[in-house]
Image: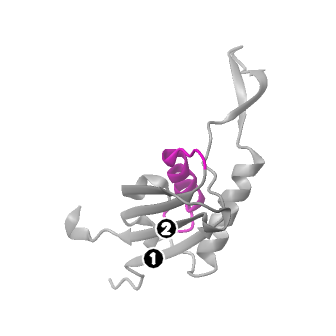
Amino acid sequence: MKMNYVKEIFFSTPGHPIGKQDYRTAGIRYSKKGMPYGIRYTTQKVKDYMEKIRLCFVSKYKVFSKEEQRNRYKLTLFVDYIGRLDIDKIANAYMDALTKIVWANDCYVDELHVSKWRVKTPEQEKVICCIELIPYHYW
């Protein structure tokens, strides 16, 4: 079976990086058994940034096929930013944004490397993303 996919993928997302925050709760509802639970949602600001990530990827590469989405991947992020930033939340935003585009589920990301650098101007803010396929003989 021959696979015809790219081994390394690089793309950049310009602008201030926004991490995927903890879910917000909008009121309390009750289940059929009477147990309370909170209605969870992701903020619109985060949804917009995740859509920007998807558009930056799709503008350079095609969506992976179902067969290609079942491979193992290594995700590397280089974050240039101003101010305070949680790199784990940025990584979570990228992993969730690229689900169903690069991988079937973010559990297919076996390695994650995130580096961050401070920049001086807002025009320099960006995230460079590198996705690598982990060959079969490594896992």
Q: Residue 101, position in %: x, y? A: 56, 68
Identify which amino acid the numbered label 1 is placed on: Ile
Q: Which residue is mark 2?
A: 129
Is residue 44 rendered magenta in the image?
Answer: no
Residue in the foreground of this view, choosing between 6 and 35: 6
Residue in the foreground of this view, choosing between 137 and 55: 55
On-image quarter of the C terminus: bottom left
Q: Which mark is residue 9?
A: 1
Q: CA distance from mark 2 to mark 1?
A: 8 Å
| Range shown magenta | 83-103
Identify which amino acid the numbered label 2 is placed on: Cys
Q: Residue at x 59, y 60 (%)?
A: 120
Q: Quadrant of residue 1?
A: bottom left
Q: Residue at x 50, y 52 (%)?
A: 91
Contact flag, marks 2 and 1 (Cβ < 8 Å): yes
Q: Residue at x 38, y 67 (%)?
A: 71
Question: Which residue of the protein is positioned furthest toward the left in this rendering?
Answer: 137
Is residue 99 rendered magenta in the image?
Answer: yes
